[in-house]
Image (tube, helix red, strand yellow):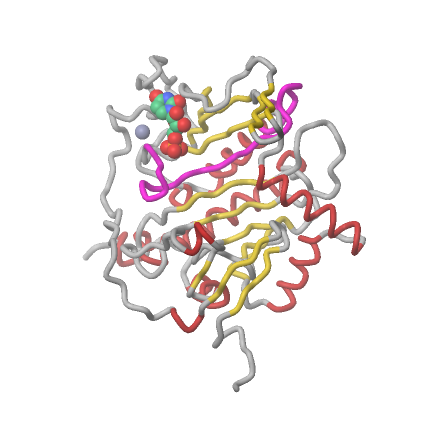
């Protein structure tokens, strides 16, 4: 029998951040696809859409009118999934029927007044303003006594369930630390207890030594496809400095975060020459007032597309019943992303100067 290799043989990879396994099937990347095909999203949008509930000056579904905002705009979600002032209460029957009240709040963050932009199409200085809004919101919301965790995220593209193409993200904040950041926190704590160092500092150093999963870097951040990536072109953005939350970034680091977001999302768009859909989010320390030196700030990007603008990865079947599975290896994904330009496909000399 041939010697086992990560390139040629089915194997499981361990995600030390969530204590989960993923099945990797590198031999299967070329299987035929006769299933659903997505429509490539190459339609052009106007800079202002009178029917958009996020454009400046428009009325939202909840009745409020947006101001004529010039850069970013934050508002309380008109349909909050979590509500402040939820009464305390608990249900517990036979240790089997268990429920607890949960209070919190939800906000929407418009990234730009321009209806037709996305993060990779915005300037680095405009993305910096988004970073600064995330910082302000994290601090402001986190200071509330009824809030102990602030989840900042973006759903991009209809394929990810985004309800509106206007560039925007969301913030959901609540009293308890939700499941995934709680799992990550546990892993970071346990690793520190056993090794005396930070799991993500050590992981970053190892990936920088190896290089094969790194997509792009700057002085303060690294964008890489994790060894244990589940989504085809999943990326984790890690701060080089061991810091726990976005408000701890200094001026140069905030600028560098805007830089790496622009560059890696541009690579995403260039992969299939479309506006690349994903869900992204920031994982950072809880806002419960306790010290969380175990936390290492990072972002996850989870994009569903697999091998073209039309063919996506579905997390169904085996994924719903057993564990996540992938065909394309994380190393191949990183290599493809690394080959791509950091100039968006519609901004090349040929496109901007049609003859
Ligand atoms: P997406 O990020 O998935 O597109 O969700 C947009 C959010 O915007 C959604 O949570 C809110 C919805 O409740 N929203 C408003 O708060 N006001 C509106 O007028 C429409 C949508
Ligand atoms: Zn709009």
- The tally of labels here is 0
Q: Tell whether 133 sits left or right of 252.
A: left
Q: Tell whether 258 sits left or right of 196.
A: left
Q: Position of residue 177 (x, y in %)?
A: 62, 33
Q: Residue furthest bottom?
A: 1
Dividing the picture into quadrants, the one containing residue 306 is bottom left
Magenta stretch?
138-163
Q: Position of residue 128 (x, y in %)?
A: 52, 38
Q: Is 139 covered by the magenta stretch?
A: yes
Between 144 and 343, the one nearer to me in the picture: 144
Q: Position of residue 321 (x, y in %)?
A: 45, 52
Q: Residue furthest front?
A: 94
Q: Is 318 covered by the magenta stretch?
A: no
The residue drawn where x is 65% and y is 67% is: 209
Dividing the picture into quadrants, the one containing residue 293 is top right
Between 162 and 43, the one nearer to me in the picture: 162
Q: Tell whether 162 sits left or right of 335.
A: left
């Amino acid at each position: 029998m041939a010697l086992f290799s990560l390139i040629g043989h089915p194997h499981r990879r361990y995600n030390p951040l969530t204590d989960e396994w993923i099945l990797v099937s590198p031999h299967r990347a070329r299987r035929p696809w006769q299933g659903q095909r997505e429509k490539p999203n190459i339609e052009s949008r106007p800079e202002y859409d009178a029917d958009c509930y996020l454009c400046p000056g428009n009325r939202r579904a909840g009745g409020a009118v947006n101001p004529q905002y010039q850069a970013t705009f934050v508002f309380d979600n008109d349909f909050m999934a979590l509500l402040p002032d939820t009464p305390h209460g608990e249900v517990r029957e036979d240790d089997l029927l268990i429920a607890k009240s949960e209070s919190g709040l939800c906000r929407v963050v418009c990234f730009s007044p321009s209806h037709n932009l996305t993060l990779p199409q915005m300037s680095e200085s405009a993305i910096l303003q988004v970073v600064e809004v995330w910082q302000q919101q994290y601090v402001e919301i986190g200071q509330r006594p009824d809030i102990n965790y602030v989840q900042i995220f973006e759903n991009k593209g209809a394929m990810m369930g985004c309800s509106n193409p206007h560039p925007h993200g969301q913030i959901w904040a609540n009293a308890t630390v939700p499941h995934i950041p709680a799992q990550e926190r546990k892993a970071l704590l346990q690793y520190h207890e056993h090794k005396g160092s930070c799991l993500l500092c050590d992981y970053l150093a190892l990936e920088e030594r190896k290089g094969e999963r790194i997509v792009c870097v700057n002085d303060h951040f690294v964008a890489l496809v994790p060894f244990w990536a589940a989504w085809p072109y999943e990326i984790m953005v890690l701060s080089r400095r061991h810091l726990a939350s976005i408000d701890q970034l200094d001026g140069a680091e905030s600028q560098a975060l805007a830089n790496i977001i622009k560059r890696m999302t541009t690579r995403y768009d260039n992969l299939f020459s479309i506006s690349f859909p994903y869900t992204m989010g920031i994982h950072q320390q809880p806002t419960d007032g306790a010290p969380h030196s175990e936390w290492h700030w990072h972002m996850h990007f989870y994009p569903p597309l697999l091998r073209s603008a039309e063919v996506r990865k579905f997390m169904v079947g085996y994924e719903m019943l057993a564990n996540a599975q992938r065909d394309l290896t994380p190393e191949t994904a990183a290599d493809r992303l690394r080959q791509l330009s950091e100039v968006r496909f519609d901004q090349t000399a040929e496109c901007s100067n049609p003859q």
